[in-house]
Image (cartoon, rainbow, N blue to C red):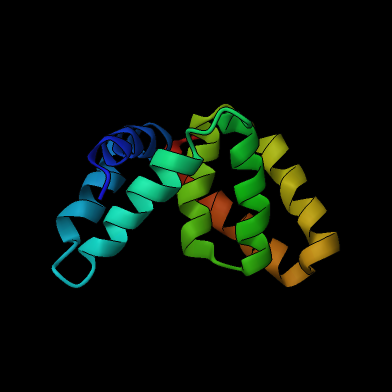
Amino acid sequence: MNEELFRQGLQTRREVLGSEHVDASLANADEFSMPMQELVTQYCWGDVWNRPGLDRRTRSFLNLAMITALNRPHELKLHVRGAINNGLTKDEIAEVFLQTAIYCGVPAAISSFRAAKEVFKEMGI
C-alpha cells in the first residue's frame, strides 16, 4: 500500500463523504474487508479523485450518473451527500437523474430520485 496516496485519499474521502461515514467504514472493516477499504481509499480517493483533470463537482456529476446507471441506491446515497458537499444543488442533481432516465432507464432514475430524497431529508435540505 502507498501510505501517501492512502493519506491523501482518506482526506479527500472525508471531505466528500463526511468523516462520520468514512470513520465508520474503517472501524467496521475486519481482516477480510480491510483490503477493500485500503484499495478504495488509496486508488479511488487518493489517486483518481485527486487527479487535476476534473474538479470534484464534475466528478460528482459523473458519479451520480454512473451509479444511477448501475442502479446502486446505497452507493448513490453516499454520493448524493458528496455531491452536495461538492457544491451541486438539488436542482442539478434532479437534472442528472432526468438525463439518466433517458439513457439508463426510468426505473433506475426513479430509484435515484427516491434515494436522493432520503438524503436531502437527512441533511435538512
65 relative position to 35: left or right: right
User: Residue at 33% of width from left, 33% of height from top?
Assistant: 8
- Image side of residue 15 versus residue 83, left or right: left
123 up-or-down from 68: above or below: above
State whether residue 82 appears in this view. Answer: yes
In this view, the residue in front, 87 or 31, is 31
- Most distant residue in the front direction: 2
Q: Quadrant of residue 100?
A: bottom right
Residue drawn at 48 percent across, 59 percent down: 75
Q: Position of residue 48 (x, y in %)?
A: 50, 42
Residue 41 rendering spot, x and y as whole percentages? 34, 48
Residue plotted at (73% across, 52% down): 97
How many labels, in total? Answer: 0
Residue occupying the point 83% across, 62% down: 103
Residue 122 visible in the picture:
no
**Relative to 59, does residue 66 appear above or below in the rendering?**
below
The x, y position of residue 50, in whole percent, is 47, 33
